[in-house]
Amino acid sequence: MQKRLIVLLSLSVLCFCLCKFANTTDLQLEPKTPAYKTVPQQRSISIFRSFAELQKKGNGIINRNIQLLKNEPDGRVLVWLLFFSLGYGMLHALGPGHGKDLVGFYFLHKKASPISAGKLAITIACVHTGMAFLLAVLFHTILHNIQGMKRIQIQNYFYFASGILIILVGAWLLYSRTKKEVMPIADEKGILAKNIYVVGISSGIVPCPLSLTIMLITMNAGLFLIGLASITMISIGLAVVLFIIGILTIKSRQGILNRLENTSRPAIILAEVFSYAGAIMIILLGLFISFVHLP
């Protein structure tokens, strides 16, 4: 039974990593192998495209409601926009990126509580949306001459910086794990609390493209407060999704260890495997992000 659990967990982690890699790399539209061998890849591309189209429709709905509010202020349209922003923020968070993988790897690495999951989710969401707000203000004021590809290049720098920070966080978690045996419990809890905010900032430093677009549109339309309210609701939706992922990871980790009995040797070994695997996966994630977004 224990071997089955370990094998199942290993396969789950491997499938998760392969899915993330497939969704964050450039997909080849021209098959290089016979058609019968590329059916799974084509299916994956189809799902990814469908999700992208769904997000595109969501962007259009938000933009149309902003234009309606610009032409004729209406409380019902505003309420609809805010509720739609909340739901769309949750949907948007399910797309590639947004810190989901980092949250999963972090809580695989460490034993944590639901409160820790909430803190990390809120930190990532606030920083992610806050950076978009700050960048939108800069683009609208002192950086208004920067347009087109140059704006995209600036966002690329944020991705690269985020990747470097994630590598450092993973390396620090790995180092801390090796020193755990000589660390007092009180100090370990304090470091856990600090790590949550460091991890959150490292992941959230990349400005949310959706929030950035909304702020630029609303600022140009003279609807600054409406734009701010909309991205706040998007941030809440993002935090909810990240919190759920954190809770699922925490409960899954603890559930597997409980089935093996926490004090048993297999459970202790598996807990060590979780800790080291989580830290190593965070480092690999940072390396991948940095490599893809090299300046």
Image (tube, rainbow, N blue to C red):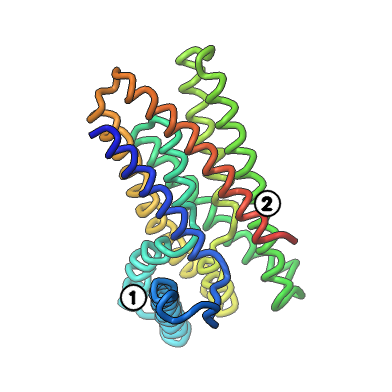
Instruction: Assign the N terminus to one quadrant of the image.
Output: top left
Residue beneath the point at 67% across and 70% down? 152
41 shown above or below 183: below
The residue closer to the viewer here, 26 or 125, is 26
41 shown above or below 64: above
Q: How many marks?
A: 2
Q: Residue furthest bottom?
A: 71
x and y percentages locating residue 204 in the rendered image: 55, 51
Residue beneath the point at 41% across and 47% down? 13
The residue closer to the viewer here, 100 or 75, is 100
Front: mark 2 or 1: 2
150 shown above or below 195: below
Residue beneath the point at 46% across and 87% down? 71
Local secondary structure at mark 1: helix
Q: Which residue is mark 2?
A: 161
Q: Upstream in the sequence, badge 2 or badge 1?
A: 1
Q: Which residue is mark 1?
A: 75
